[in-house]
Amino acid sequence: MASTLVDLVKISSASTGTGAISLGPAVQGYRGIEALTNGEVYSYSIQDGSAWEFGRGTFLSDSSQFIRTPIDSSDGGAAINIKANSQISFVALSEDLDAVQLSNNALAAASQTQVDAAQVAQDREVVEAAAANVTSGEPAYPNAYATTLPLGVTYLSDDGLGSGTGGTPGTYEGGVSGGPSGFAWTYDIGDDGSIADYRITNRGLSTSSTAPTLSYPSGSITGATVPTASVGSRVGEGDRYWAVSDDGATLDMWTNDGTSTPAAVLDPNGDQIKLYVASGLDGLASLFTASIDASFSPPNYAVPLVIDADGNIPIWLLKGLLDGTGIGPNIRGIIAGDIAGAVDGSIDRSFAPPNYVVPLVIDADGNIPVWLLNGNLDATGIGPQMISVIKSELKVAPEDFALRNSPTTATAPVVTDGRTLWKARGKLATLANGGTALLSIVLTGNSWSEQLPIATGMRTYLERLGYTCAGPGWIYVRPGDGIDDNQWPEVNLSFSAGWSLWDVVDAGPPDTYGCGPDGHALWATGTTATLDLTAEGTDFRIFYRKTLGAFVWSTDGGITWSDPVTGDGSGDLGIVHIEGLGSGQHTLKIALTGNTDTVVLYGFHAIDTTVSGFVINKMGNGGAAGNDYLLWADDYIQPCAAEIGADVIIDNTVANDFRLATSNGVANTPDTCAAAADAVASNWQAACPGAAVITVCPSLLNAAAGSGYEIPAYRDALYKACITYGREFANLCDTWGGWADENANGQYAAGALGNLHPGDIGGYRIGRFLISTFPNPERLSA
């Protein structure tokens, strides 16, 4: 098996034992994991005291793990028991050097006119090893896949998700027995000890449809259902791929035509499309006819573009420049003025004489993708390879966002300019000059907005500038469970038996009970359930669904209850206003006296109307992804939003979209995340004219990309959506360092929660960044 070779890579590790190695920082003077590629196989060696080991292993970028397979060791060929701070060298082994010698032998053999069967087999091995370097756009496979489609693991069943108990949270390498060679998968154990997610990291390769048997070898989980692996074609129906020829001299093009046997892809003459590879360059000289000078053979690097049935090569590239044996009568006629008849509908008629169009390439369907117009190169478009070259020459960042160490090459800022926050800035100016105003800030999205660190960071920063908090604002109805108990410290919400929570993220669409703008609803039947709320404010509001149920309320322990609050059965939003209380803390009690149906509560709102200042409404939903918000945004945001009011809406998104493959049965992608962000923003702005929306892309997190897309892909999609719809954008992905560095700097929460969430310090940093960057609350000292 061939290894990928890398230069000057030596990495230290804190791992111990005989298992997979967690790669750490580079040894001083060497390169680190940035030189390695996910899923590639590398040769390695370890010297640990008197113990030694060398072999090959696979690098997994998601977990920075190196899965080692020893070839030999001081422990009889088994993996040695390494100590902490050992060093792993990525070096060429003697077997790798043998492969280089084999390549040299194959090149010499290519020039021979007669090659025996053993030599042909060696040549084919060289071509198969080089196949991964083909850049024509289709994958390349060994010769075995010229007669059967390349197969691999294409799907893992989802029956294992949520199963098992007692596991240690983390990401682990899945157990594999049998199946396609090289297949690998990883699984996540969540905070509750069950299987949270799993994914394929290497589909493997096989000619057989036999599926592997999977297991959970690590994490100490019990009772978990193991997913079933499905094996299918690695090449989609109608897609093409290359396979090494029998003699090893060419790569032949095949296609998946929907059967189990590949079909040859033919050129207009009915011959199979072939690619002559580098190992046969010396042999190409014999294919050139007398019309091509012998000096065109290596080392001048002539690359044939067309080979006819007689082996003639009329057109070739010489050192990258187009050349040929001459111009035939047809092309002469084109140049003389018959271009219009030769250029088909893929080129506008204005390209005909006197504009002097010269087609350079005509494909099998008669299309002309590349041509010369008045001597200038033109084409129907530019591919990714050419775009990369152009950006490199112009010193333009390869994506919309520059690397952290090259800010001058950025083509987009890490934040937008904040011009839509005129309303919020006006209220801050009023407050700063002693006027009367209430700045309403809404935090929506995922658990970054539901939990306290970021919201507290905003409140603390504003209070340090001299602004006054006017109350807790929105109070959500989710019961505390130790993780999601994230009410403001001055808020206490308690329930008797009889209440149930409907969370759209866990329970599905809100068809039965509806929900608040955060996707939560609390419901009860019968007459015995009660609820107690303690919070600060002069005005309280109760948001409920208009069912046929009934409830009563009282304040501050009063024995006098309100008249029954009863809906009309329409399912619309109902609001109870409780006003005129004194400043300070109050209690609100709800009872279901006289109820004969279902009572549904969406949330509460509390502010002190005697205070000029700000309120931060926490409306996040832990675990929510874009596809979850799409279930309720259009129907359940606007009614509550119109009552509460907002000047700034901050949408924390992406964290769940990138780490979860699906939400509510729909694949999570950058496009669905951007669509959800637009739906949330559109509905808030429709209810609150003049409000600004800030969409936040999070920092890099310590989780695997279960969706198949890393956070930067979501960053790019969100930025483009914000620019398209005139909203603000904040890019923490490029303003924070990597997770490990920031975690060591105390920016993330303690324990497993910190894999995805900032701690108090990080929350203050984010809150201060968002407030100071956008509303920019400058205030003179008192």
Image: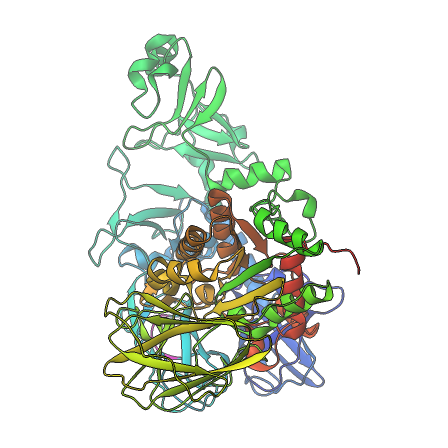
Picture quadrant of residue 623: bottom left
The colouring scheme, among rainbow, by chain, secondary structure or one colour, is rainbow
Farthest residue to the left: give it. Answer: 259
Farthest residue to the right: give it. Answer: 782
Does 701 appear in magenta? no
Vertical arrangement, residue 664 with respect to residue 525, above or below: above
Give the side of residue 297 with respect to residue 744, left or right. left
Q: Position of residue 499 (x, y in %)?
A: 35, 85
Q: Position of residue 558 (x, y in %)?
A: 46, 87
Residue drawn at x 34%, y 28% is 362
Q: Position of residue 159 (x, y in %)?
A: 30, 78
Secondary structure mostly seen in the magenta stretch:
loop
Q: Position of residue 34 (x, y in %)?
A: 62, 61
Count of numbered tags? 0
Q: In front: 140, or 484? A: 484
Where the C terminus falls, by quadrant? Answer: bottom right
Residue drawn at x 52%, y 49% is 719
Farthest residue to the front: give it. Answer: 560
Give the side of residue 427 with respect to residue 256, left or right. right
Q: In front: 683, or 539? A: 539
Residue drawn at x 55%, y 50% is 728
Q: Is residue 667 visible?
A: no
Q: Which residues are magenta?
A: 176-180
